[in-house]
Image (cartoon, grey):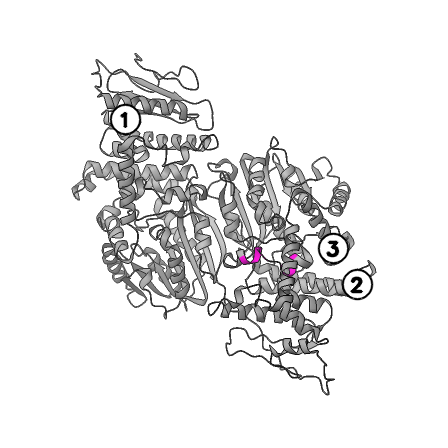
C-alpha cells in the first residue's frame, strides 16, 4: 500500500496493512482549498491529541493517515473510510457535532461495521481523559473548540436552539413528543417485550434482555418498599410495564403521568388487556400540574429526570416533595454526567440534545443532591451504569436486525445512521464509565415518633427563684411564673420533656447564646430533667421538630439554631465563637492540635464507653437488643466487602483510630495495610494491638497528615471511616485530590462520614455550634452535595448508602456505658462538668440521627473506566439494609 501522507505521531511507524485492504486502482479524492485546510487542521489535531489507541483514516484513493499513541491504557483500533472531503470541514468547524453530522450523512463509514464507531468514540474519550490534566483542550465542546466564523455561527445556532428548547410547561410537551411519539411500532422493534427504555440489570453477559429488564423493575419495586395499602405515583411511566408489575405484585393503587400521547395509548391498551383498570390510572400530565393536595406514599421516576433540565431541577424536586406523604419514599433512576464536565455540557449542545432528546440535560449527581427538596433525605444510591453498555448493545443489535421493518414504517437511511450513532455514542460513554446511571432512594424526613409519657406533676411547695432584672427580661421571653408549659397542636411529635431550673442564669444564657447557651447552662448544672434517661434527648428532638415545622413560615429557625441572639452580649458571644472557630481551621499545624484535644484525652476513657473493638463510628444493628460489639463487627464487614479487599492489595486507611479495622482486614485477607493518624494516644494503642496480634509484618501505623502522603506510592484500596468530618470545608478539595493521587488506577476508595442537610450547610459551616465548641474543635460535618462536588475530577461514585438510622442506637449504647462508668471516668481525673458535657454530646447527636436530621453515609468511589476493580460487573454492593449476615 502506498502512503502519500502518513503521520505517525507518537509511536513510530505503525503498520496498517493488517487493518485495511488496498483499493484496486483507487480514484484519488479531490479536495477544495478549504477542505485541504480542514484536513490539515484535523490531522494536526489528532497528531497532538492521540496518546492511546489507534485511529486510521483511509481516503478514497491511496491516502492513509495513522495516529497511534504510546499509552497502553486503551488498546482499541478503528479504521475510518472517508467518502466525502466534507468530513474534514464538518469536523473542524463543528467538532463532535460535525463528526455526528458527517456520519449521519454518509461522509464516512468504518471497515468494522460492528464495533468501528463504538471504538472511535471510546478512543476519543480515553484520550480526552488522558489529556485533560495537560491542557484545557479536551474540556471544551467535546473534542476541541471549533474555529473560524463558521464555527462561531454554528455554535450560536446550536446554543439558540438549546435555549428555545428549554422545558417550559409548553415546550416540554413538544420536546417529549419529538422523540417518544415517533412510533410505538419503532420502539417495539428494538426494545424487548417489556418495552422498558432504561438500563437493564444483567446477571451475566449472555442473559437475555427481557430477564435483565425484569430484574431492574423488581429492583425499583424493592427499593420503593411498596405495599398493598400504598398509593404510588410514577412520573414518566413509559409504556406502562413498571406500573403493571407493581400492581400485580402488591395490589396497590397506581397513577402514572406522561407527556407522550403515543405512550398513553399503548399503556392504556395494555392495562385494559391485563384487567387492571380499577388499580391503574394513566394520564397526560406535567409534574408541575400535579395537585398539591394529593399525597402519594411512593413516587418512582425511571430515567425521566434527564428531561427536566438544569433550570427546572429545584422545581421538579419541590413538586415531588409536595406530592409525597409524610412517611413516603421516592426512588429515582437517572443517567448522569461527571460533575467536572457538567457546567460546560449544560451550556452547550451535543449530539444527543441536537438529534435525539431536544431539551434533554443529563444532571450530575452533585446537581441532583443539591437540588433535592429540603425535607427529603437520601437513603441509598447505587450506580448501575456498568449495566447500560450491555443494554445499549442489545438495543443496537435489535435495531439494525430490524432495519427493513423500520424503513417500512417510513424512516430512511439517515434516520438509521442517526440512531446507530446514538446507541454507540451512549454505549461508549457508559462503557468507559464516563456516564453513570444511578438509582437513588429518598425518604421524607418526617414522622418524629415518640411514645406518650405521663404528665409530670411539678414539685410541691417549690422555693421561689429570685432572678435579677436582666434575668427577668430573659425569662419574659417564655412568659414567666414558676411552672411554664408549652404544648403544640401538631401531633407529629408526641414527645414531652420537663426541665428543672436550678439557676436563673439559665434564661440569660439561652437568650443571649441560643443553642450554645442551652449547652452551657446544662454543662454548668443550671438545669436538669425530671426524666434523667430521656429528658435531654426529648428536649433536643422537640426543638428539632419545631424548627422543621416552622422553617417554611419564617427564617427564624434558620439562624444560629433556633433564633438569633439578641443585644450586644449576644453579638459579642457570636463574635467570640466565630473567631475561635476561624482560628481552629485545619491547617497542617492546627489539625494536630484539634485532633489531640479530643482523641488524646485518654485511651482508658474511650475504652470505658466504646465496645471491645474500640470502634468510634456508627455500628450496623440487626435488632434493637443486639450487643454493640456484634453490630460494630457488622459495620466493619460492610466496609471490607464494599472495598473488595484481596490478599494482593495494599490498603491505606486515613484516620486509623485504635486499629481494629486494620487488624480485621488483614486477618481476613492477608493484605498489606498502612494506617495514618494524628493522635499519639491512638497510635500507641494501635501499635500495641498489632504487636499483640503478631501482624507487624502486614500492618504499619504512622503519625501522618493526609497532605503528607507521598504521591509516588499508590494504594489499591483507601478506606476512611468518619475522618472527613475533621477535614473542614476549606480543605475538602485538597483532601480528595490527595486521595486521588494516592489511589491506583484500578483502585477503590470507601468513605464513611456524618452529614448535615444541604439546606443548612452554609449557615452551619459559618457558625460555631455545640460540637465544634465543646467536642471536636475544627470539625465540620459536610453535606452529601459538598462531598460529591468536591470529589477529585477522575473519581466516580459507584454506591452510596445512608446508615444513619443505626447511629441513634450506637450513641445510646455509648451513653449508657459512659454513665454506668461515671465513677471510673472521674477516677481518671475528669469532673462533673465533663460528664455533663459528654452526656449532652451523646444526646445532642442522638437527637439529630433519630430525627434523620443527620445522616451517616458510606460511599464507594472508583476511577472512570475502572472495570477491573469490581471483578464481576454484575455483582451488586452489600447493604446494611439487606438480610445478609456478616462474618
Residue 735, image x and y in percent? 58, 42
Residue at the disc numbered 1 = 88
Residue depth check, mark 1 versus mark 3: number of the one nearer the observer: 1
**What residue span does the magenta drawing correspond to?**
763-772
Q: Nearer the viewer, residue 2 or 373?
A: 373
Does 769 appear in magenta? yes
Label 1: which secondary element: helix
- Residue 77 position, x and y percent, is 38, 25
The quadrant where residue 568 appears: bottom right
Q: Disc 3 designates what residue?
A: 606
Residue highlighted by disc 2: 831
Q: Nearer the viewer, residue 177 or 873?
A: 177
Residue 603 relative to residue 27: left or right:
right
Mark nearer the N terminus (2 vs 1) = 1
Q: How far apart are marks 3 and 2 (CA)?
A: 16 Å
Q: How far apart are marks 2 and 1 (CA)?
A: 79 Å
Picture coordinates of residue 228, whole percent (x, y):
41, 67
Q: In this view, does 204 lie above or below 42?
A: below
Amino acid at each position: 500500500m502506498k502512503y502519500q501522507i502518513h503521520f505517525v505521531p507518537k509511536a513510530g511507524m505503525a503498520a496498517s496493512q493488517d487493518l485495511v485492504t488496498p483499493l484496486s486502482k483507487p480514484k484519488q479524492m479531490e479536495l477544495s482549498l478549504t477542505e485541504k485546510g480542514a484536513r490539515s487542521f484535523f490531522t494536526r489535531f489528532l497528531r497532538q491529541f492521540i496518546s492511546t489507541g489507534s485511529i486510521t483514516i483511509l481516503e478514497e484513493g491511496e491516502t492513509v493517515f495513522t495516529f497511534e499513541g504510546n499509552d497502553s491504557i486503551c488498546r482499541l483500533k478503528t479504521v475510518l473510510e472517508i467518502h466525502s472531503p466534507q468530513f474534514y470541514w464538518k469536523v473542524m468547524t463543528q467538532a463532535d457535532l460535525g463528526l455526528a453530522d458527517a456520519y449521519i450523512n454518509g461522509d464516512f463509514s468504518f471497515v468494522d461495521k460492528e464495533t468501528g464507531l463504538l471504538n472511535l468514540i471510546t478512543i476519543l474519550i480515553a484520550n480526552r481523559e488522558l489529556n485533560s490534566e495537560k491542557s484545557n483542550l479536551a474540556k471544551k465542546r467535546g473534542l476541541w473548540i471549533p474555529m473560524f466564523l463558521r464555527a462561531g455561527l454554528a455554535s450560536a445556532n446550536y446554543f439558540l436552539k438549546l435555549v428555545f428548547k428549554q422545558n417550559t410547561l409548553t415546550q416540554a410537551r413538544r420536546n417529549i413528543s419529538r422523540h417518544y411519539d415517533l412510533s410505538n411500532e419503532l420502539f417495539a422493534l428494538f426494545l424487548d417485550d417489556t418495552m422498558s427504555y432504561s438500563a437493564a440489570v444483567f446477571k451475566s453477559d449472555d442473559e437475555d434482555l427481557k430477564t435483565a429488564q425484569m430484574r431492574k423493575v423488581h429492583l425499583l419495586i424493592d427499593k420503593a418498599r411498596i405495599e398493598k395499602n400504598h398509593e404510588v405515583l410514577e412520573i414518566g411511566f413509559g409504556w406502562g410495564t413498571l406500573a403493571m408489575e407493581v400492581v400485580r405484585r402488591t395490589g396497590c393503587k397506581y397513577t402514572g403521568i406522561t407527556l407522550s400521547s403515543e405512550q398513553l395509548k399503548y399503556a392504556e391498551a395494555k392495562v385494559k388487556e391485563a384487567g387492571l383498570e380499577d388499580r391503574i390510572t394513566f394520564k397526560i400530565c406535567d409534574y408541575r400540574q400535579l395537585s398539591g393536595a394529593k399525597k402519594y406514599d411512593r413516587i418512582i421516576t425511571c430515567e425521566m429526570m434527564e428531561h427536566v433540565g438544569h433550570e427546572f431541577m429545584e422545581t421538579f424536586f419541590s413538586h415531588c416533595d409536595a406530592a409525597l406523604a409524610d412517611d413516603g419514599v421516592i426512588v429515582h433512576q437517572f443517567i448522569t454526567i461527571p460533575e467536572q464536565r457538567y457546567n460546560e455540557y449544560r451550556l452547550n449542545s451535543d449530539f444527543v440534545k441536537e438529534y435525539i432528546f431536544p431539551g434533554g440535560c443529563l444532571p450530575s449527581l452533585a446537581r441532583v443532591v443539591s437540588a433535592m427538596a429540603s425535607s427529603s433525605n437520601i437513603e441509598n444510591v447505587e450506580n448501575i451504569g456498568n449495566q447500560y453498555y450491555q443494554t445499549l448493545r442489545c438495543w443496537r443489535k435489535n435495531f439494525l436486525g430490524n432495519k427493513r421493518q423500520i424503513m417500512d414504517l417510513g424512516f430512511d437511511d439517515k434516520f438509521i445512521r442517526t440512531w446507530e450513532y446514538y446507541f454507540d455514542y451512549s454505549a461508549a460513554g457508559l462503557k468507559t464509565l464516563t456516564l453513570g446511571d444511578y438509582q437513588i432512594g429518598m425518604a421524607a424526613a418526617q414522622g418524629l415518633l415518640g411514645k406518650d409519657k405521663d404528665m409530670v406533676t411539678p414539685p410541691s411547695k417549690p422555693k421561689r427563684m429570685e432572678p435579677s432584672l436582666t434575668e427577668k427580661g430573659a425569662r419574659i421571653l417564655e412568659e414567666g411564673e414558676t411552672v411554664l408549659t408549652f404544648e403544640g397542636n401538631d401531633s407529629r411529635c408526641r414527645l414531652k420533656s420537663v426541665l428543672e431550673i436550678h439557676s436563673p442564669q439559665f434564661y440569660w444564657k439561652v437568650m443571649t447564646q441560643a443553642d450554645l447557651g442551652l449547652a452551657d447552662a446544662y454543662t454548668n448544672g443550671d438545669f436538669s430533667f425530671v426524666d434523667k434517661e430521656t429528658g435531654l434527648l426529648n428536649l433536643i428532638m422537640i426543638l428539632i421538630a419545631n424548627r422543621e415545622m416552622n422553617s417554611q413560615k419564617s427564617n427564624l429557625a434558620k439562624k444560629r439554631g433556633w433564633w438569633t441572639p439578641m443585644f450586644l452580649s449576644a453579638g459579642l458571644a457570636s463574635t467570640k465563637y466565630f473567631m475561635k472557630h476561624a482560628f481552629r481551621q485545619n491547617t497542617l499545624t492546627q489539625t494536630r492540635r484539634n485532633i489531640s484535644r479530643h482523641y488524646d484525652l485518654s485511651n482508658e476513657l474511650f475504652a470505658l464507653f466504646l465496645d471491645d473493638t474500640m470502634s468510634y463510628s456508627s455500628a450496623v444493628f440487626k435488632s434493637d437488643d443486639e450487643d454493640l460489639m456484634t453490630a460494630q463487627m457488622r459495620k466493619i464487614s460492610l466496609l471490607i466487602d464494599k472495598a473488595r479487599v484481596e490478599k494482593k492489595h495494599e490498603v491505606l486507611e486515613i484516620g486509623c483510630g485504635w486499629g481494629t479495622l486494620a487488624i480485621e482486614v488483614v486477618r481476613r485477607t492477608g493484605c498489606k495495610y498502612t494506617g495514618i493518624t494524628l493522635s499519639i494516644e491512638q497510635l500507641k494503642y494501635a501499635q500495641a494491638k498489632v504487636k499483640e496480634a503478631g501482624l507487624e509484618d502486614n500492618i504499619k501505623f504512622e503519625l501522618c497528615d493526609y497532605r503528607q502522603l507521598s504521591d509516588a506510592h499508590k494504594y489499591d484500596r483507601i478506606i476512611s471511616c468518619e475522618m472527613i468530618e475533621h477535614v473542614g470545608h476549606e480543605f475538602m478539595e485538597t483532601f480528595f485530590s490527595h486521595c486521588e493521587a494516592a489511589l491506583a488506577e484500578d483502585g477503590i476508595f470507601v468513605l464513611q462520614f456524618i452529614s448535615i442537610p444541604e439546606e443548612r450547610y452554609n449557615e452551619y459551616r459559618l457558625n460555631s455550634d455545640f460540637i465544634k465548641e465543646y467536642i471536636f474543635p475544627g470539625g465540620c460535618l459536610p453535606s452529601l452535595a459538598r462531598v460529591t462536588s468536591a470529589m477529585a475530577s477522575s473519581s466516580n461514585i459507584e454506591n452510596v448508602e445512608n446508615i444513619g438510622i443505626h447511629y441513634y442506637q450506637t450513641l445510646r449504647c455509648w451513653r449508657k456505658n459512659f454513665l454506668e462508668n461515671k465513677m471510673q471516668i472521674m477516677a481518671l481525673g475528669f469532673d462533673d462538668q465533663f460528664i455533663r458535657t459528654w452526656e449532652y454530646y451523646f444526646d445532642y447527636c442522638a437527637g439529630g440521627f433519630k430525627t434523620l436530621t443527620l445522616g451517616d453515609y458510606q460511599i464507594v468511589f472508583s476511577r472512570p473506566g475502572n472495570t477491573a476493580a469490581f471483578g464481576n460487573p454484575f455483582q451488586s454492593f452489600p447493604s446494611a439494609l439487606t438480610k445478609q449476615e456478616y462474618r
